[in-house]
Amino acid sequence: MSSDTLNPTTTKLVIGAGDFLDLACEAWRALEPGTAIERVSLAQDDAYRFDLAFLAEHDPARVTVFAAFDDRFLNFKRLELLAFCRMRGYRLPPCVAPGAVVAPGVKLGENAFVGQGAVLAPSCRVEHNAVIGANCSVGFAARIAHSVWMEAGAVIGDRAEIGAHTSVASGVVVARGVKVGKLCELRVPGLHREDIADKTYCNPDYPDPLRIFN
Amino acid sequence: MRSRMRPEHYLSEAVFAREQELLFRRLWIFFGFKTLLARHNDYLERSIGGVPVVVQNFNGELKAFENVCLHRQARIQTGMSGRRPLLCRYHGWGYDAAGRPENIPFHDDIYRFGAGERAALCLRQFALKTVGNAVFVNLAAEPIPMAWQFSAPFMDSLRSCSESWDEEIIFGRMPGRYNWKLAFENLRDGNHPRFVHPSTLAKHVTFQAPVDEAALAAVEAAAAGTPGPRERREQLRGFSFGVPDAPLGPRPAYDWHEHVERWPEGGDYYYNWLAYPNLHIASPDGGYSFTIERHVPVAPGQSELLVWWVLARKKDRYPASPAVLHAMMLGGRPVLEEDIRVMELVQSGLHADAPIASQGAYEYLSRGVEQWYSDLMDGRFEF
């Protein structure tokens, strides 16, 4: 773990790793110039566990957290960070990067992220821990369930649904009304016009989707 | 030592057709998992030896039939697995547990089969046996006893490990441009990992290529003599085995280990099971997880690797178990890609006058299989 400065009055810990950690720090610095944004780069041990002992040094009443970890382990690692912080009483407000367009009335869950240039149409729903990458488009009345990961530029049509823990890659377009199950991956660019069952993995390295049964 | 395998064994359409007939339509072939057939109307469908086969649960009883409707020959079940009655989508013929069309819509108006003709309609049924969680099918009209093909210790080991498998399974398919036999030759070759997998598998596990002098002498003695039917059966049984293949070094204890019942016989070894002709099972972590691979012949120079990963049976609900299976599948892919690339390298070098392989003493297992195989292909014996 490495950390920058710490402001004892108003502080946000942005914890995670990789590009998303940097993106989230940039977004929070632009959104809250008066807040000390502490970037906390998390390492994992050889069993992929985080060392989160440092959280005990902070006061949840004075510090908020944002968990900025990518979609590894089907987005469970980011959820693990969120759950750990929540259990210790930290608040994890959502982050809407400058330049994103969020229609009035759209509700964003805890630790949700909306990247620069993304557009969220009216009546859509983005649940906790969902990450909408830069320049993504989420259509009218679409539902993005918790712990979803959308890479930059992914497009979700009107009234489409993306199930929990699903990852959607750049170049993917989910057509209007299509239901994508939970725990899926859509990594093959192109238009997806049919519903996709839970635990289905469209991966360009395989000729047809991987599936988990039972 | 020169191999008994000739280039035509990997290139010839005629040899391929003969293999389909003499091996895949006569031997017990791994078909799938009982846990995917647990409920009424659960089915699995795939081809064996070029024949579409469906295994379906009828009120708890598993039956194997030719997956071709008796009316217009459409495949009845599709999509590899699912849950629906044995009902053809083309004209709605529905079949019962005996394979008879119990429902032919509009029969009396437009088909008008006579009583005798209708009574004769029945799907071709195949023999089916389960060993633990593993389902095997045999297409022969008079199947050989399973004990001719697999030894009792092998079946005990397969039963034991497969009964420890969880019901949640990930599946994927990897096509390749190589003959199916190269896969098993590669799997029997303990000398290849250090060269083919130096930065993946061999980085973590040290496989040996031992020379079993007694086994080598037995193979060469059999090659010099004329084995009878009993010896042929014993040879065949010897092609399938399960072993603790290589010791495992220190490794992390992952969180998910606490949520599964490790295979009780699992020690700190990399385990391999090879079941002739085309099933390979491995547990790379001493019984916490298993990969099951079926190498399907598609054409002389084309195969399909069907890959499943399964964890040991879960003790409790573990929401992230799909992420573990997903990680296993993608994490294991580089090793399989390396194998496929090297098999394609071999296949691409073969031509009618290609040099015959020169084998070392450590390749006695493959030499035994080759001797049996080439004698069968050349018509020196039948089973």
Image (cartoon, rainbow, N blue to C red):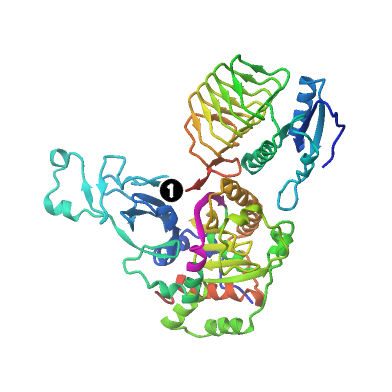
* Residue B249 in picture, x, y percent from top left: 72, 65
Judged from this view, the residue extending furthest toward the right is A5
Answer whether residue B276 is visible to the viewer in this image.
no
Is B168 inside the magenta-drawn segment?
yes
- Residue A174: x and y, percent? 54, 28
Q: Quadrant of residue B232?
A: bottom left
Image quadrant in which you'd find residue B136: bottom left
Q: Amino acid at mark 1?
A: Met
| Neighbours of disc 1 within 10 Å: few (<14), some (14-19), many (20+) | few
Observer-nearest of B223 and B198: B198
What residue is shown at x 62% (from left), y 58% (from top)?
B343
- Please tell me whether residue B209 is drawn above or below residue B33 in the rendered image: below
* Residue placed under numbered mark 1 in the picture: B80
Q: Under tag 1, what secondary structure?
A: loop
The quarter of the rendered structure image containing the C terminus of chain B is bottom left
Magenta residues span B159-176
Can you tell which quarter of the image residue A157 is in?
top right
Q: Is residue B93 visible?
A: yes
